[in-house]
Amino acid sequence: MMPKRWYSSANFDAKKPPSPHAMMYRKWGKPVGRLLVLSVGSYYTLFYLWEYLNKKELQRDMIAK
């Protein structure tokens, strides 16, 4: 059994409703974060794919000369 936390506030068990500001972040945080991660991931994936294909094209051009 865990000892009671004597240093915590007296009304620790009382539930306060979350502020509207916090609710906005709870509601939109995950979708916006997911969109940000997917956007940045897609950008870098396409960028490195383009670099890879450009490098292969330059190598092919050098061999053809």
Image (cartoon, grey):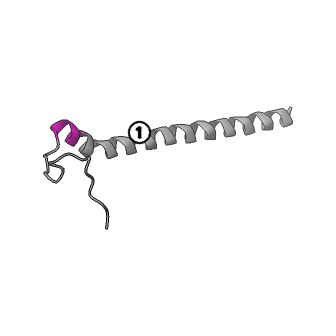
Picture quadrant of residue 28: top left
Q: Position of residue 31 (x, y in %)?
A: 32, 45
For image coordinates 51% across by 42% down, the residue present is 41
Residue nearest the observer in this picture, 59 or 64: 59
Q: Amino acid at mark 1?
A: Leu
For image coordinates 41% across by 39% down, the residue present is 36
Side of 18 where 54 appears, left or right: right
Count the marks: how many?
Answer: 1
Q: Confirm whether the magenta stretch covers residue 22.
A: yes
Q: Confirm whether the magenta stretch covers residue 16.
A: no
Q: Position of residue 21 (x, y in %)?
A: 20, 36
Picture quadrant of residue 33: top left
Side of 62 where 17 appears, left or right: left
Side of 59 where 12 appears, left or right: left
Region of the chain picked out in magenta, as a range:
19-24
State which quarter of the image contains the C terminus: top right
**Most distant residue in the bottom direction:** 1
**Image position of 13 with respect to 48: above or below:** below
Side of 39 where 1 appears, left or right: left
Give the dominant element type of the magenta stretch: helix, strand or loop.
helix
State which quarter of the image contains the N terminus: bottom left
Query: Element type at marker 1?
Result: helix
Residue nearest the observer in this picture, 28 or 44: 28
Residue nearest the observer in this picture, 55 or 28: 28
Q: Position of residue 47 (x, y in %)?
A: 58, 36
For image coordinates 30% across by 60% down, the residue present is 3
Q: Which residue is mark 1?
A: 36
Q: Residues within 10 Å of mark 1 (few under 14, many from 20)?
A: few
For image coordinates 45% across by 44% down, the residue present is 38
**Image position of 33 with respect to 3: above or below:** above
